[in-house]
């Protein structure tokens, strides 16, 4: 998967005609220089494209309109090198539908102490030009990311990098299609929600196919295709003896390959970016897709179990944001607890479907009974997950708004072997500590299903939430249960009052 390669971010410099040709020529030169130099660092995942300086309401409107109608434009970086009276921006900003990063920078890093004169002062005005621009964005209540610092500062590039990933994921989500094989798990609340509101808010659609539609595709897969999948399994995983050629359960591996090939064909033919399934609706399928879901996730598809379309869409967005970074992103569930004093932790897993992109070592391909659903034993990948900083993210429907909830965690190695646990697993210590993190999560209504990330930070998800215009709550090292409860109360009022 590489969805960033075809995208571009536009670099738009604001000014006005007042300055005269000489100054405007310098402004254009400086902006082009910055764009070229930043692209040459190769530090950013999406190419920045220079756009000519905008100096009038008409030019500003035109660039915003063009950004909207340019399919591969994922967002705009704006910068006011000189003063650009911001009433000129109102109509353009009213029309703009792409994410914006306001880069509050300056061409020169230092004040040239011995040579500075009024010509220099006239040219290098972002210190006040960007404030005028910031005012109109705030006055119009437009979400944007503000990044401050010299454009050669690595930390500035990192802030832009994070936002670009969020903007790229947002771009990927517009018009994205997700399919549910079967409906929601019966009676479950948090995995349900308003799909119409979600499509209006996020731009993706979710539709359900009866499992029979998928089964028909699975049953039409030919033997050569199945054999090719089995060959991949043999190359990529350590198969347990029962699944090897001549093994007692070899036929189950062949059935798994048939299911994966069928699901892949269904997803490709329908141009879907993710899917859900449910163990309650597998009519005509031999097994719950374990290995197939794990592998499809690793290829970039969003996935969640039990019809949880919000988490499937979130996992897809997280995979897009994490492209090219070390580590992976997976569907996850808070499964069971270790409540040892001073060493409390969560064991995260699912019935089967943890993405192999977060596997620490070569996964073991195994077959075990599934004590739920009444189907044949499903094949699955079993592995551990590396220790290190990570996070869990949950997207929930609060009725009047969507909430993106994050908990920063520290993944840890298992202290003991888990010889009888037949699923992929990860252990983590939630921040700030087990009791406050879990209490905060529960007060916030966070789901048991999450997207687990090794390579995204809270900033990626906050930027994404800001672009989407949804609520963002982060439970991290500086949180307390009380601070989160207060934030939830204040947000409740904010979202009742702010209907924009
Ligand atoms: Mn589940």
Image: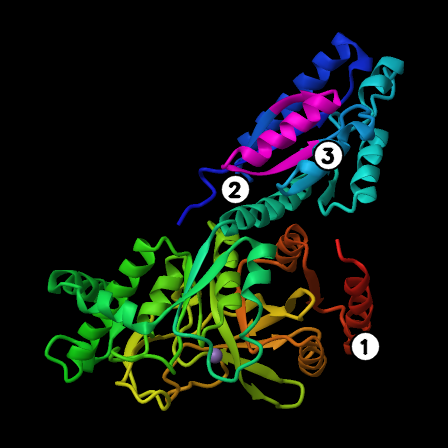
Task: Residue 389: tell me if it is visible.
Answer: yes
Neighbor class of circle 2 (other Cα within 10 Å; few <14, some 14-19, many 20+) is many
Residue located beneath label 3 in the image: 150
**Of callouts 3 and 1, which one flags the residue occurring earlier in the amino acid sequence?**
3
Circle on res. 482: 1
User: What residue sits 53% from the left and 62% below the top?
Assistant: 314
Q: Nearer the viewer, residue 169 or 479?
A: 169
Whether 49 is among the magenta residues is no
SS label for mark 2: loop
- Residue 276 in the image: x percent, y percent? 42, 69
Residue 287: % across, % down: 28, 80
Residue 128, quarter of picture:
top right
Callout 3: 10 Å neighbours few (<14), some, many (20+)?
some
For the residues bearing labels 1 and 2, Cβ distance under 8 angstroms: no
Q: Is residue 362 visible?
A: no
Q: Is residue 482 left or right of residue 187?
A: right
Q: Is residue 328 left or right of residue 87?
A: left
Q: How many marks?
A: 3
Question: In whole angstroms, how far apart are the C-alphas of marks 1 and 2?
Answer: 38 Å
- Residue 76 forms part of the magenta stretch: yes
Q: Residue furthest top?
A: 21
Q: Which residues fall within the magenta stretch?
A: 51-78
Label 1 beta carbon less than 8 Å to ligand 1: no
């Amino acid at each position: 998967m590489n969805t960033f390669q075809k995208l571009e971010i536009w670099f738009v410099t604001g000014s006005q005609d007042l300055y005269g040709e000489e100054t405007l020529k310098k402004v254009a030169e400086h902006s082009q220089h910055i764009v070229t130099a930043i692209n040459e660092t190769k530090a950013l995942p999406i190419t920045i494209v220079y756009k000519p300086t905008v100096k009038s309401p008409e030019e500003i409107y035109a660039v915003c309109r063009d950004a909207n109608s340019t399919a591969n434009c994922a967002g705009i970086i704006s910068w006011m090198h000189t003063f650009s009276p911001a009433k000129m921006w109102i109509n353009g900003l009213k029309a703009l539908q792409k994410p914006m990063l306001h880069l509050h920078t300056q061409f020169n890093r230092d004040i040239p102490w011995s040579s500075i004169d009024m010509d220099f002062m006239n040219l290098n005005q972002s210190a006040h030009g960007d404030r005028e621009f910031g005012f109109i964005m705030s006055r119009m209540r437009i979400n944007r990311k503000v990044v401050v610092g010299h454009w050669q500062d690595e930390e500035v590039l990192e802030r832009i990098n994070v936002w670009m990933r969020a903007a790229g994921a947002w771009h990927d989500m517009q018009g994205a299609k997700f399919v549910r094989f079967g409906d929601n798990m019966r009676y479950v609340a948090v995995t349900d929600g308003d799909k119409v509101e979600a499509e209006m808010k996020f731009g993706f659609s979710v539709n359900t196919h009866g499992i029979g539609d998928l089964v028909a595709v699975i049953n039409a897969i030919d033997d050569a295709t199945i054999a090719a999948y089995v060959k991949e399994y043999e190359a990529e995983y350590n198969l347990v003896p029962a699944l090897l050629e001549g093994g007692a359960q070899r036929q189950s591996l062949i059935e798994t390959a048939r299911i994966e090939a069928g699901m892949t064909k269904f997803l490709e033919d329908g141009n879907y970016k993710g899917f859900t399934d449910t163990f309650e609706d597998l009519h005509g399928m031999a097994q719950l897709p374990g290995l197939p879901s794990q592998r499809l996730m690793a290829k970039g598809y969003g996935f969640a179990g039990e019809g949880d379309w919000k988490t499937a869409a979130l996992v897809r967005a997280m995979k897009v944001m994490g492209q090219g970074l070390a580590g992976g992103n997976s569907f996850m569930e808070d499964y069971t607890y270790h409540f040892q004093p001073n060493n409390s932790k969560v064991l995260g897993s699912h019935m089967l479907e943890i993405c192999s992109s977060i596997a620490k070592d070569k996964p073991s391909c195994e077959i075990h009974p599934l004590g739920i659903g009444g189907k044949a034993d499903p094949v699955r990948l079993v592995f551990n997950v590396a220790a290190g900083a990570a996070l869990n993210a949950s997207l929930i429907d609060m009725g009047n708004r969507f909430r993106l909830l994050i908990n920063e965690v520290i993944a840890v190695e298992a202290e003991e072997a888990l010889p009888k646990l037949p699923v992929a697993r990860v252990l983590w210590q939630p921040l700030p500590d087990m009791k406050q993190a879990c209490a905060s999560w529960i007060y916030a209504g966070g789901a048991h299903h999450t997207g687990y990330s090794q390579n995204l930070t809270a900033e990626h998800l906050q930027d994404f939430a800001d672009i989407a215009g949804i609520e963002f709550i982060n439970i991290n090292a500086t949180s307390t249960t009380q601070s989160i409860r207060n934030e939830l109360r204040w947000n409740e009022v904010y979202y009742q009052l702010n209907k924009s």
